[in-house]
Image (cartoon, helix red, strand yellow):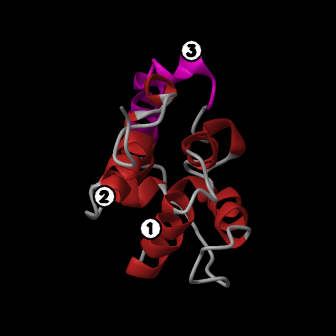
Amino acid sequence: MSDEHDPPAEWAKLRPLTQDLILSINEDRYPRVATCIDFGLATPRHYEAIYHAYRNGDVTAAALEAALGSGPKLTELVRNAPHNPHRSITFATVWDELEPEFHIRRTESEVRQPAKVYDFARERAKRKRDRDHDPER
């Protein structure tokens, strides 16, 4: 027997941050910091918008998974939800500022390779260090 607090059927296909968001909504608690960052939950109003949309069935776990890391997609998803109490809210994530080739990947093979994002961040930090310590500048 299932109830409203059970994880969705597609649970295994969701990334950890989407899982944390769903659990947070189902358990009436605030999500972890990483989840807030990647879902653009900058204020309690942002969380309430997603919370009410998901709890009332306007937004699915798969839709949240597809919108993870994209402020414009999250904004559109939530603004179209009838139960969203904050209709004019706009979402923004740190991923929105990155070049498109570095956006969060959505293919199953890349979900299982989180090191790609870490490697990108490490390389970017190395280039910045090198640029900051370049004696020719």
The residue that disc 3 covers is 109
Name the quadrant of the N terminus. Answer: top left
- Secondary structure of residue under mark 3: helix
Quarter assignment of residue 53: bottom right
The residue sitting at 63% across, 76% down in the picture is 90
Residue 41, which numbered label?
1
Q: Residue at x 42, y 26 (%)?
A: 114
Nearest the viewer among 51 and 74 is: 51
Give the magenta range: 106-124
* Gap in angstroms between the C-alphas marked 3 and 2: 26 Å
Label 2 neighbourhood size at 10 Å, few (<14), some (14-19), many (20+)?
many
| Rendered image: mark on residue 61 | none
Q: Are marks 2 and 1 in contact (CB under 8 Å)?
A: yes
Q: Please, which residue is most extreme toward the front here?
A: 1
Answer whether residue 133 is visible to the viewer in this image: no
- Amino acid tagged 1: Leu
Foreground of the two, 115 or 119: 115
Q: Position of residue 105 (x, y in %)?
A: 60, 32
